[in-house]
Image (cartoon, rainbow, N blue to C red):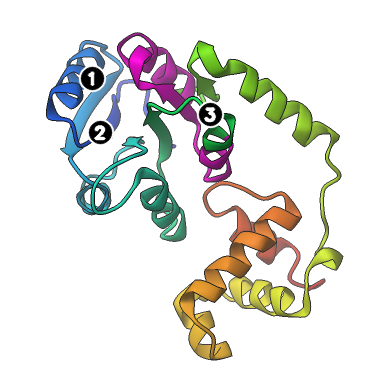
Amino acid sequence: MPQKMSEKFKILIADDHPIFRGGLRQVIDSEQKFQVIAEASDGETALKLIEEEKPHIVIFDVNMPKMTGFVAAKELRRKNQDCEIIFLTMHGEEAMFNKAMDLGAKGYVLKDSASVDIVNCLQAVAAGQNFTSPAITTYLFKRATRNTNKTTGSIEDLSPTERIILRLIAEYKTSREIADELSISYRTVENHRYNICQKLDISGSNALVKFALKNQNEI
């Protein structure tokens, strides 16, 4: 997230509740370091605005019409959009939190404390750190402990089809191009990509492409 010292961090808010969205914008714009450059009321509109406006940080409501925050985030990663993601949600369940983190989110803020937590979250994410609302911080610690204790997978753990797909990813081919070349559906390719990331413990924008390029001689 390249940033000049004098430049403000550009923020996009995607939430289908205009009053909540407006209140959040007011809180964020009161901070000198940040500027809300666009708002969206659904996931599809948010993706279009992200391509046009190039925000540094995107705040997604998890539940939105047309396209949920999770689906929109997955699409962002597929398109390799260079922005960080924060999720807003009413859900405090650990499973939802882990799903958000698996999608490469840097922040996870509960809506009932958003007016207090959002600025701290933005400051942490802008500094390259993770942030969660205090009420669910324990999830972040548990996740970090789990990842520390987990043995990282290797290419040897991949199936023959997964290795073929990883090889094609190293050739900068999109999921659509891979689907056409292997005569399988786009969704099947996406499922394989997800499984590869899970086996190799990879997450984040461009991480799979970087791994494929670095290890293409071993695939």
Q: Residue drawn at (51%, 20%), measured in percent from left and top?
A: 132
Q: x and y percent of residue 171 in the render?
A: 59, 76
Q: Identify residue for label 2.
A: 13
Please give left or right for residue 46 compared with residue 87 in the image: left
Task: Answer whether residue 146 is magenta in the image.
Answer: no
* Residue range corresponding to the magenta coloring: 98-125
CB under 8 Å between discs 1 and 2: yes
Crowdedness near tag 3: few (<14), some (14–19) or many (≥20) residues, C-alpha within 10 Å: few
Amino acid on which the number 3 mark rests in the picture: Glu
Amino acid on which the number 1 mark rests in the picture: Leu
Tag on residue 112? none
Q: Quadrant of residue 165?
A: bottom right
Please tell me whether mark 2 sits on a helix, a strand or a loop. Answer: strand
Q: Identify residue for label 3.
A: 93
* Sequence order check, earlier mark of 1 and 2: 2
Along the line of sight, the residue nearer the viewer: 177 or 14: 14
The quadrant of the picture occupied by the N terminus is top left
Amino acid on which the number 2 mark rests in the picture: Ile
Q: Identify residue for label 1.
A: 24
